[in-house]
Image (cartoon, rainbow, N blue to C red):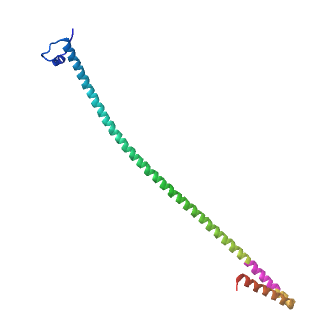
């Protein structure tokens, strides 16, 4: 026994006899129509998903471009900071070198002035001793004193001309 739903039978033209063939065709058409509607709904759902995915893809592309630009800007900032750091280090090294150089020059000047002062004091002491002994010699032997006096005067005069100019 065949049970046929009223909706299927309603699709059969009224003039058509209710034969197995007509009912079978009505059932086939109904199944095709239902499958077609179901496929349309699935297709519409897929279209919606594709549209949504395309939007998300475009959004991700935009974000990727923004991140790339941000990355490039950060790399430029890093390079700029690296160059500034290098300049500061060079300036720091230069300042350190100049400070050490100045300290060395100051130490050399102090050393030389100390040596000159020491030599001057020794020369002054030696000259005073020479004068004292020359005075003693003048009291004992005026002739020998006169010879040494001439030698000392000639030595001092030559030394002043050679070393000091004029």
Residue 16: x percent and y percent?
14, 15
> In which quadrant of the rendered view does residue 33 lie?
top left
Answer above or below: position of 116 versus 95: below
Query: Camera-side residue: 113 or 150?
Result: 150
Classify the position of the N terminus by image quarter: top left
> In which quadrant of the rendered view does residue 115 lie?
bottom right
Q: In the picture provided, is 139 more to the left or to the right than 15? A: right
Answer above or below: position of 11 versus 134: above
Query: Camera-side residue: 163 or 126?
Result: 163
Kindly identify the residue that appears in the image at 52 percent across and 57 percent down: 85
Outermost residue toward the top in this view? 1
Looking at the image, can residue 4 be seen? no
Looking at the image, can residue 132 be seen? yes
Classify the position of the C terminus by image quarter: bottom right
Q: Is residue 125 magenta?
A: yes
Q: In the picture provided, is 110 more to the left or to the right than 1? A: right
Kindly identify the residue that appears in the image at 78 percent across and 87 percent down: 154
Q: Is residue 86 magenta?
A: no
Query: Camera-side residue: 29 or 69?
Result: 29
> Which residues lie in the magenta part?
120-133
Instruction: Tell me which secondary structure the magenta stretch mostly adopts.
Output: helix
Residue 64: x percent and y percent?
39, 44
Answer above or below: position of 23 versus 50: above
Residue 124: x percent and y percent?
75, 81
Outermost residue toward the left in this view? 15
Kindly identify the residue that appears in the image at 46 percent across and 51 percent down: 75
Residue 160: x percent and y percent?
73, 84
């Amino acid at each position: 026994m065949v049970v046929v739903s009223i909706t299927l039978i309603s699709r059969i033209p009224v003039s058509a006899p209710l034969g197995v063939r007509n009912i079978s065709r009505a059932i086939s058409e109904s199944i095709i129509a239902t499958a077609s509607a179901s496929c349309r709904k699935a297709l519409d759902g897929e279209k919606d998903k594709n549209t949504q995915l395309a939007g998300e893809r475009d959004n991700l592309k935009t974000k990727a471009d923004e991140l790339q630009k941000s990355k490039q800007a950060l790399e430029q900032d890093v390079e700029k900071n690296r160059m500034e750091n290098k300049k500061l280090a060079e300036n720091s090294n230069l300042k350190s070198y100049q400070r050490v150089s100045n300290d060395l020059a100051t130490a050399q000047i102090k050393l030389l002035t100390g040596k000159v002062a020491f030599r001057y004091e020794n020369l002054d002491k030696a000259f005073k001793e020479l004068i004292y002994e020359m005075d003693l010699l003048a009291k004992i032997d005026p002739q020998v004193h006169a010879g040494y006096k001439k030698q000392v005067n000639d030595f001092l005069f030559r030394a002043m001309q050679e070393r000091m100019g004029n």
